Amino acid sequence: MKEFNLIITSKRRNEIRCEKEFLVLSNILGLENVEIERTKFSGVIICKIEEDPMNFIKRAKKIIEEDPWSFRYIQRIIPIQKVCEINKIKDVVKDLQIPKDSTFKIVVNKRGSNVKSKEIIEEIASIINGKVDLENPDFIIDVEIIEDIVGLSLIKEEDIISIPKLQEKILSSEIE
């Protein structure tokens, strides 16, 4: 699958269970035509849905926050806004518009690629207008590399569903 708009991660060797869990979530949200493909990298699944991935994340997060412990196999769901070949990153990043006076950081996750993260970060940073803030950025330029295909997104921290973080947040609030 060359076009995808979600990356779903699971613990290693739980991909089949993760897929089933995601299909249940998709069904609850009324999605049709969900395409799922396991990558050759353990714990990494790519998915194509017909809904805008950012809208899906918002809707899914509401369901997951109600009972994050009912999700045992999905670890994270990452929205992908643009997909390109690795040598086209610079062209595609130009389309990601960071609002004026906003801060950003670049996060690179590589799977099966020899390209250096530092080179990708330098290439992207050279064309982005904005101030870098590695601690508390307004936006994250998320670069998900799977061999020679790249998924890019301009997102906020809360746009990535991390079920372990949601569970931890609930546990820490119960302790207080």
Image (cartoon, rainbow, N blue to C red):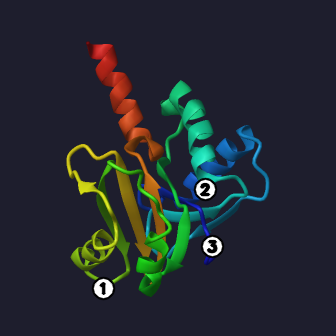
The quarter of the picture where residue 173 lies is top left
Q: Considering only order in the chain, which callout, 2 or 1, is on the residue closer to the N terminus?
A: 2
**Which amino acid is tagged 1?**
Asn
- At 32% from the left and 62% from the top, the residue drawn is 129
Q: Secondary structure at mark 2?
A: helix
- At 50% from the left and 68% from the top, the residue drawn is 95
Rate crowding at label 3 as few (under 14), some (14 to 19) or many (20 or more) other CA atoms within 10 Å: some
* Residue bearing the label numbered 1: 114
Q: Which mark is residue 19?
A: 2
Above or below residue 100? Residue 110 is below
Q: Considering only order in the chain, which callout, 1 or 3, is on the residue closer to the N terminus?
A: 3
Q: Residue 105: x and y, percent?
A: 28, 56
Q: CA distance from mark 2 to mark 3?
A: 18 Å
**Which amino acid is tagged 3?**
Glu
Q: Residue 64: x and y, percent?
A: 55, 34
Q: Residue 158: x and y, percent?
A: 42, 40
Above or below residue 75? Residue 8 is below
Task: Give the tally of numbered discs.
Answer: 3
The quarter of the picture where residue 143 lies is bottom left
Q: Residue 152: x and y, percent?
A: 47, 66
* On-image quarter of the N terminus: bottom right
- At 38% from the left and 24% from the top, the residue drawn is 170
**Which amino acid is tagged 2?**
Glu
* On-image quarter of the C terminus: top left
Q: Which mark is residue 3?
A: 3
In-image side of 170 versus 116 (left or right) = right
Foreground residue, 172 or 107? Answer: 107
